[in-house]
Amino acid sequence: MTAAITIGDFSKMTHLSVKTLHHYHEVGLLEPAEVDRHTGYRYYSPEQVPTAQVIRRLRDLEMPVTDVKAVLAATDAPTRNALIAKHLDRLETQLARTQGSVDSLRTLLEGPETDQATEHRSVATAPAVGIQDVVDRADVLAWWQGALGELHASVRAQGLPMTGPAGGLFAGDLYQHDRGQATVFIPISGTVHAIGRVMPFVVPAAELAVAVHYGSLADVDITYGTLGSYVTTHEISVDGPLREYYLHDSYDTPNPDEWQTEIGWPIFRADATT
């Protein structure tokens, strides 16, 4: 006969609190071997100890309960390992994002090594291929990555010569109200065939104060802050979308330390030639 283990002893064996065991029972993650129908006391079996240990380790890795259930329900090792590997990939992505935030904060605390170089630039209209949408601020990075990938694929598929670096236009509402219009584009020559989200687009003319951001876009707000402070102090800022040009990005090198992004802030230039 299998020995019945009280929930208190099972808790001590597995290092899972009684409250946690109650919760796992309620959500169907780890049900007791037996529940006394008169007293409601929960009892476990020795065979459940390894399962509980696996659950504790997966939960320590912040795996959602639904995913833990899927791992435990897997009938073969490849399926189980694939589920765990997928979660580990998510953890590595989160870790990289956290490390990027830590590095960015340290850089910010240390202060800029040199003054940010800023130039004035008159940008003419340019034919391009683009994707435009109204997006939430929380979704803009994923939208931006997907849209740029779609544009590059379309340019290659249609054999369109690029006439400049890819870029983006971002309305002020996106920053001020967490939702606004975003556009990514690639300047090209030739006839663009509209396919799905990809459409012909004309990059508008603008007068800009421009600064270059070096490295990952995780701390691009630092360059935005420096450029915006310069414009507020020395220029006349005008309404219009903020602009980015990706001079050297992930399509050129996987190393973010080598990326270069131009940030353009719309201004009124008294010295511009009409």
Image (tube, rainbow, N blue to C red):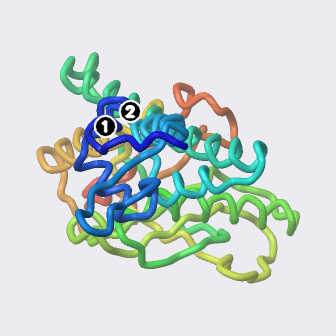
As rendered, which of 164 and 133 lies closer to the eye? 133
Q: Residue at x 26, y 21 (%)?
A: 106
- In which quarter of the view is residue 208 placed? bottom left
User: Quick one: quadrant of the N terminus?
Assistant: top right
Label annotation for residue 14: 2
Type of the residue with mark 2 = Thr
Type of the residue with mark 1 = Ser
Q: Residue at x 77, y 77 (%)?
A: 192
Residue 271 picture location, percent across and down: 30, 53
- In which quarter of the view is residue 137 placed? bottom left
**Relative side of 56 to 19, left or right:** right
Compared to residue 18, the image places residue 199 above or below, namely: below
Crowd band around label 1 with a 10 angstrom C-alpha radius: few (<14), some (14–19), many (20+): some
**Relative side of 222 to 80, left or right:** left
| Residue 272 in view in this figure | yes
C-alpha span from label 1 to label 2: 5 Å
Query: Outermost residue toward the left?
Result: 233
Residue 117 picture location, percent across and down: 33, 31
**Relative side of 249 to 188, left or right:** left
Q: Residue at x 38, y 45 (%)?
A: 210
- In which quarter of the view is residue 248 placed? top right
Residue at the spot of label 1: 11
Residue 235 picture location, percent across and down: 19, 51
Q: Secondary structure at mark 1?
A: helix
Residue 25 picture location, percent across and down: 37, 59
| Residue 94 in view in this figure | no
